Image (cartoon, grey):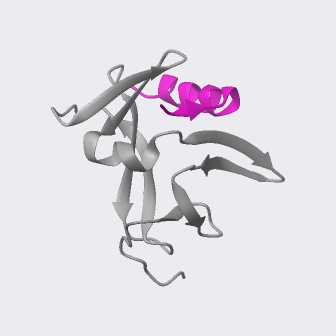
Amino acid sequence: MINISETALDRIKSTLAEQENPDLFLRLGVNPGGCSGFSYAMGFDDQESDRDVFMEVSGLKVVVDRSDVRYLNGLKIDFEETGMAGGFTIENPNAIASCGCGQSFKMKDEEGRPEVCD
């Protein structure tokens, strides 16, 4: 299960509403790499695969590749406004460490592909 705060949902839904493609949904995933070994992937997509797991979070269609579910189960996504900027924050109960940027994480039993931070 993935949890998305009301603030993050509002931001995602308003961005989706600005898009010309009514078939878009939110795709979440994990890529090898990043400072801690794995990095989050989050974006809009309209292509479905037989490897996808579908869920609905407060009326928002969320899709995760089956192979990424183990990394993202219990994930909490929020959106925070800070000063002149703002952005999505991710809290992952499966991660044993996260990079300072919040976009990279480390798993207990998998090394991933750690990269040097710029």
Residue at point 38% right, 73% down?
Answer: 111
Where residue 23 sits: x, y (%)?
A: 32, 21
Where residue 103 sits: x, y (%)?
A: 54, 60
Residue at point 53% right, 39% down?
Answer: 74
Considering the whole magenta stretch, tell me its main secondary structure: helix
Task: Report the side of 31 relative to 103 (left or right).
Answer: left
Task: Report the side of 25 relative to 78 (left or right).
Answer: left
Where residue 96 sits: x, y (%)?
A: 56, 63
Q: Up-down: is 37 above or below 41?
A: below
Q: Nearer the viewer, residue 109 or 66?
A: 109
Quarter-wise, where is residue 7 in the image? top right
Rendered-image quadrant of the C terminus: bottom right
Where residue 67 sits: x, y (%)?
A: 27, 47
View extreme (front): residue: 109
View extreme (left): residue: 50
View extreme (right): residue: 83
The answer to if 16 sits in the magenta stretch is yes
Q: Up-down: is 12 above or below 65?
A: above
Q: Up-down: is 40 above or below 35?
A: above
Task: Report the side of 103 relative to 86 (left or right).
Answer: left
Residue at point 33% right, 26% down?
Answer: 54
